[in-house]
Image (cartoon, helix red, strand yellow):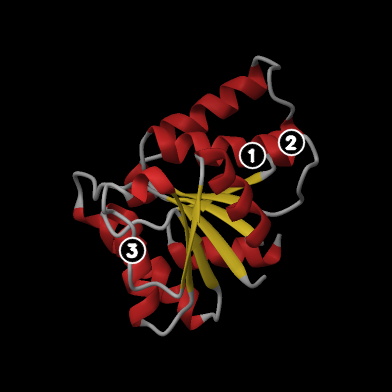
């Protein structure tokens, strides 16, 4: 693995532990010489992980749609910033660069991006590891939903096993590396 794509919020969230986890993950990426691929913003958890990765000497690649640059949220101090035309182009480019995917806490955008990557995995469009960093049980309800989908036979157990889960950044990176 060389690059980890992290989907996360453009907000910091209600609990300081979310930002701390993003910073810790960024520091670990740099320490392990793994580049960060992310949404290219300087705000929220996106800004926190990018800044932490950079501060620890790591490489940061952002991919942001042009309409978001116009809102002045593009990070101007990262290693590379790719400006694309649409959200779909953003996800495609991020998936092409990345060797693995992680979802930090976030809202609709984070969930949509992560679920699309999981769907691509289910369909066999990639074989890259995917995982959620379940800080303070943030993703417990989503994980329960996926488990219920297995029980109700809408999701095969083999497809549920496509994504990993951990509550500590270091453990999740180890799981991605061992995938």
Vertical arrangement, residue 164 with respect to residue 157, above or below: below
How many residues crowd mark 1 within 10 Å: few (<14), some (14–19), many (20+)? many
The reply to whether dot 1 and dot 2 touch (C-beta < 8 Å) is: yes
- Pick whichever of labels 3 and 2 is earlier in the sequence: 3
Task: Tell me if 168 is positioned left or right of 114 in this view.
Answer: left
- Residue at image point 28% right, 54% down: 73
Residue 23 shows which numbered tag?
none
Q: Secondary structure at mark 3?
A: loop
Q: Secondary structure at mark 2?
A: helix
Taking depth in this image into account, of 85 and 122 the one nearest to the observer is 85
Residue under numbered circle 3: 75
Taking depth in this image into account, of 24 and 107 the one nearest to the observer is 107
The quadrant holding residue 108 is: top left
Q: Secondary structure at mark 1?
A: helix
The reply to whether dot 3 and dot 2 touch (C-beta < 8 Å) is: no
- Where residue 122 appears, as percent x and y from the top left, is 74, 36
Residue under numbered circle 1: 118
Residue under numbered circle 2: 122
């Amino acid at each position: 693995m060389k690059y980890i794509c992290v989907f996360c919020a453009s907000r910091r969230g209600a609990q300081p532990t979310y930002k701390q986890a993003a910073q810790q993950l960024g520091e670990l990426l740099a320490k392990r010489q793994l580049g960060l691929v992310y949404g290219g913003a300087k705000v929220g958890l996106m800004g926190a992980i990018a800044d932490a990765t950079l501060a620890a000497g790591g490489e940061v690649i952002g991919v942001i749609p042009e309409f978001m640059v116009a809102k002045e949220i593009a990070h101007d101090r990262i290693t590379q910033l790719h400006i694309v035309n649409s959200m779909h182009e953003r996800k495609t480019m991020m998936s092409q660069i990345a060797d693995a995917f992680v979802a930090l806490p976030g809202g609709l955008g984070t969930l949509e991006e992560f679920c699309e990557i999981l769907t691509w995995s289910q369909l066999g469009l990639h074989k890259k590891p995917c995982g959620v960093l379940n800080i303070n049980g943030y993703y417990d309800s989503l994980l329960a939903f996926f488990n219920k989908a297995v029980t109700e036979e809408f999701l095969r157990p083999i497809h549920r096993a496509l994504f990993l889960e951990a509550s500590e950044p270091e453990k999740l990176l180890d799981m991605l590396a061992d995938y």
